[in-house]
Amino acid sequence: MSEITMPKLSDTMEEGKIIHWLKHPGDSIRHGEAIAEVETDKADMVLESFDEGVLEEIRLPEGQSAPVGAVIAIMRKPGAEREEPVTAIPTAHEPEEPVTAIPTAREPEEPVTAIPTAREHPAPAEQGNGLATPPPFHPAMSAHPSAAPTAMPAPPTRVVQPEAHPPAPRQVESGDGSKIKASPLARRAAEEAGIDLSAVRGTGPDGRVTKRDIDNFLREQQMFRFRRLVAPREGAPGSREELSSMRKTIAQRMALSKREIPHFYVTVEIDMEETVRFKNSLEATELFDEDVSYNDIIIKATALALSRFTRMNASFENDGISIYPHINIGVAVAVEDGLIVPVIHECERKSLPEIARHAHRLVSKAAQGGFTAEELSGGTFTISNMGMLGIEHFSAVIVPGQAAILAVSAIKDRPVVRNGQIVIGKTMMVTVSCDHRVIDGVVAGRFLQEIKRFLENPASLLVG
Amino acid sequence: MANSRYDLVVIGSGPGGYVAAIRASQLEMRVAVVERDRPGGVCLNWGCIPSKALLNSAETMEAIRGAAKEHGIEVGDIRVDFQRVIARSREAADKLSRGVRYLLKKNHVDLYEADAALSGPHTVALKPAPDKTPPEVSMLEAEKILIATGSGERLFPGMKIGDGVMTSREALVHDRLPESLVVIGAGAVGLEFAYFYRAFGVDVTVVELEKQMLPGFDAEIAEELRRAFVKRGVKVMLGHGYRSMEKRGDRWAIALDADGQPATVEAETVLVAVGRVPLSASIGLERAGVEIGRGGFITIDDSFRTSAPSIYAIGDVARTPLLAHKASAEGIAAVEIMAGIREPGFDLLTIAGCIYCEPEVATVGLTEAQARARGIDVKVGKIPFRAIGKAVAVNQAEGFVKLVASRQYSEVIGCQIIGHRATDLISEVVLGRALETTTAEIGRTPHPHPTLSEGIMEAALAAEDEAINF
């Protein structure tokens, strides 16, 4: 018998609300399986089980909140082991999807999800040097799932045979063909949790992956999940709605920012002609593996400007100004009923294609609706881009703990003067909101000039 | 010894201290070791090594007797020169102690033979040790200090050494065989000496407060060992607590208490083996701000750091189990953590416990009961030595191998062996644990035949209900 408690899923989380129970009393729960959707101050996320057993009792009904650490359900350890099909996968779950299953209406066994064919047919043992890879006990279990492309936990694809012998030790190859060092126990645990070993950082001798690394990986993978932005939420006229945890946090933080931080705003118009050409030529030449977006280019230009104007990458605290050691740029992303700010860490060390790669990974995670805690924390400067909405010009509210935020508007056809002639050019308005306790107008102005200089001479972005 | 400033000063040259010092020197620290007795500590001089030499004599004695009975080899009168038995043990200790001295020198570790006391977080005061020439310097300065002072024999209040009362330390140099002996305490040390003296024909009684021999060990192992001792003619009194002792004529009378029932046992000689205590007093810990916790052990964190940031502690003085190989492994870990090349933390479940009587006992990791108490669902494979061909061939079919694996991943989480050469067999499972092995790897690794190690392979298979030879 074990208690399931409300986990602390972010630094600031104090309580969580059950949106849906995905499991009901009597349901069996596997390691890593989603059991409930929880609303926290940051986001809605899925609570995954770190244990196996049968859900005995639900203590916290749907729609109710409980503080971190409170018992929300009781789980019974598995009794007599029986062969059970692998059940629905946690990552495939769409939060929007209504949970319709009612205990009485449920089939006694959950349907078997498709199992990759490699699992179903006996596969020959992977051929190594013929010494290190003796044939496995159960050939059907020997094939390793094809390396999952993402770090997300893949569905557990192994048919569990509780009394069966564990799979034989084998050489698992990472995507680039090199052998992954991992302990037999780590391999076994990774396989059961459906983790691609090549995604796990090993801390043993020579980077060997140990069981502890798998446990840590699973913990880090505890995803924050979001409902994707479909359309901004509209309230019916005359209606009133309770604040979601995310709205509550936004309300607190933004009010705090405007109350405490003396904002001032500086705007500059940037000629984007060269940047447009630059981006097109990157596309045409396929110089990088990664597609580079305007947003990536702006992040890189901002990072370069921040490395020269360190006060823009600072925070005002305890009557002092702390300059951050790294440039971690948060990019505001709209989600249903709020926004989140995934962070690209250490931008000062990343080249343009590296920034693009990280940004794209975050974008695809946003599309899937999941971020790790680390990806949502540690920001030192924020960019809010409303270019895709065709916005002329706007200003943003500083994130508390930072000194400035950059509001990026759309690239538009506007009349510009070139060689004494009025021509139609492509320009973009950017506005920086600054904390006047840290930054004075002249610094803000120079900072924008620097961004402008980089964007009007984008070849410079390829250096450094 | 031109300069008395060091990166690291190690206090104590036992298996923890000297090993840590050599490792530190390999990592290019300037290192000194302070030792007040003989290099090598209790292990080399008063523990592991000389006692194993004695046990080797006991085993030889059993073999010669067995030769007559089992092998049809006729042996005449067996006469024992017990002084020679003791002398041989001392020779082994001396040889290895000289070896430690040589190793320290070879690794450029300065050895100060003196009494050490902390006088601050970075200073160690040296005072002349008994029977030693006074040190050339009176103070060592150190960036970091490692305390590895070990442990000493524990006595109950009112006990006094001498006049037929010994601890293991006196027994190691006691060169006269007693006619009868009471051993107080059925832990590793008590049982080894009980076995040793019994092999030389002494009338031995073992007294233990707990209801089983080897308290804390697997109950089945303890019971198997009790039977082996009784078979050899050792009297075993379990559940008997020590109350007091008094001399009656030339014998000692020990008053005992068995759940309220008084009892008495008499013998010419008494061996007190009721555990060991950390040597944390009188080394000036309070002056350096080093905290001492329960049982007199120095309080340490994951990095072996004490409450004083520049001072570390390892081995017996820091925590149980009190074992030489644990101290060595901790010494290496502590120094590597200091050097920043290792993550904090140390897995005590890879420390094996060994008892060198016959049959030997060796264990690592959790027992079945301990695992269940921690909520781990386990499966157990058990193979008797009589199912191992080699054990039968060499007439050592006493004992069994028990291997404990988790049901979830078949992780090898513990192993208990009682039987011939158990202490040599256990290392396979220790390595297995260190490498996070499952029963699959051990069970399917071809073990050479015929060897006793096949018992471990079969036990791994047995845990999966796939044993071939049992």
Image (tube, coloured by chain):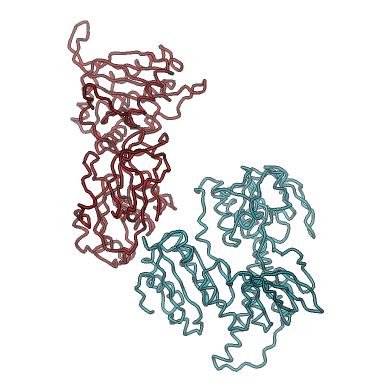
Colour displayed for chain B in the image of the structure? cyan
Given residues A113 and A109, the one toward you in this image is A109
Residue appearing at x 59%, y 62% in the figure: B323
Given residues B347 and A335, the one toward you in this image is A335
Residue B441 in picture, x, y percent from top left: 37, 66
Residue appearing at x 31%, y 47% in the figure: A35
The number of callouts visible is 0
Residue B172 in picture, x, y percent from top left: 70, 72
Q: Residue furthest right?
A: B249
Residue B449 in picture, x, y percent from top left: 41, 78
Is A291 left, or right, of A219 in this rendering? left
Q: Residue furthest top?
A: A420
Given residues A261 and A285, the one toward you in this image is A261
**Position of A376 relative to B136 (above/below):** above
In the picture, which chain is red? A
Q: Quadrant of the C terminus of chain A?
A: top left
Is B124 left, or right, of A20 in this rendering? right
